[in-house]
Amino acid sequence: MSPGIDEDDEDMQDVELALENLDDGHMLNRSGTFNPTLNNKQLTGKSFREAKRARFGNKAWILSINDPKKTQWDLFIMILATINCFHIPFDVAFQPPLFKTTIFQLANYFIDLCFFIDIIVSFRTSYINEKTGAEIRDVKSIARYYFKGQFTIDVLATLPFDTIAAIFGGGDAFKVFGALKLVRVLRLNKIITYLRSTEEFKAFLKLNKLVFLLVMYLHCFGCLWWMIVDSEQLWIPPMNYNDDDYYIVYGQEIIYKYFVSLHSAVLLTTGNDVGPRDTWMVIFGSVGLFLGAIINANIFGELAVLVS
């Protein structure tokens, strides 16, 4: 026995060391040699319980942020969020009858349920301390971190606004809040950051992320543009300037209307005019031109960083 250390302290050190090696399938004593008598079955009694509580405490059942299962779950949630972000603006702007069917309603309920489960998973997922770089696995610290960050947005993104609008009224504009689900797509940045892969592959993923976010922006902006122009039906698409019927677009199929609005979103993003006819169109078109300039600058800046 070492000087100044009583027998109980030695036993506690042996137990703590055994706990450290539980995952390795073997037990080592303090000298670092194999101890066949010190195993999980024989580590019983008060010393084992105290050491286990001191070592693991309230860190049990915590999912590591680097766990491959967590990455797979995040990708699954991102896919559901992407579906929602394509579905919700399209539903509000064009109101296709297909989206009113029972199958689509059940699919929406399933997605909302998955988003609710994701909130629970977030409360049991570790995070990286930005100052120290250490992985934090304490339950209370994780809860505080989540409450200060994404919790409010995740809750709002989980609420079934389409069902709430149907019950309490508020119209289709109330459903637009469901687009907050798009925020979950932004966790792609964390997935790429903590992905165990080469820097070249990460750069490739970042490039595809830019393309993906650009498509999402064009889709959402195009749908919002159609919501504005369809209210008064005064807007004339640039491709119809030479037609006999300037307003023929309003009597066309939904898919044609969608691609006309998407074309307008592309024009505004690239700095072109779409011929606004009233105040709201001018305001929204100006916002589109401004956002388009920012997006173009961001894309070229990201490409320059990736190339370098």
Image: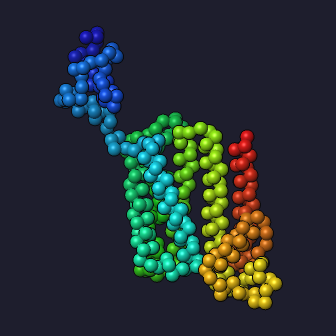
In the rendered image of this protein, does residue 230 appear above or below residue 8? Answer: below
Q: Would you say residue 239 is visible in this rendering?
A: yes
Q: Quadrant of the N terminus?
A: top left
Colour treatment of the image:
rainbow
Q: Would you say residue 224 is visible in this rendering?
A: no
Residue 306: x and y, percent? 69, 44
Q: Nearer the viewer, residue 77 or 8?
A: 77
Q: Residue at the spot x=30%, y=17% of the render? A: 34
In the visual, does 199 lie left or right of 19?
right
- Residue 229: quadrant of the picture: bottom right
In the visual, does 242 lie left or right of 31?
right
Residue 188: x and y, percent? 55, 51
In the rendered image of this protein, does residue 248 appear above or below residue 289? Answer: below
Q: Quadrant of the C terminus?
A: top right
Give the residue furthest to the right.
242
- Residue 242: quadrant of the picture: bottom right
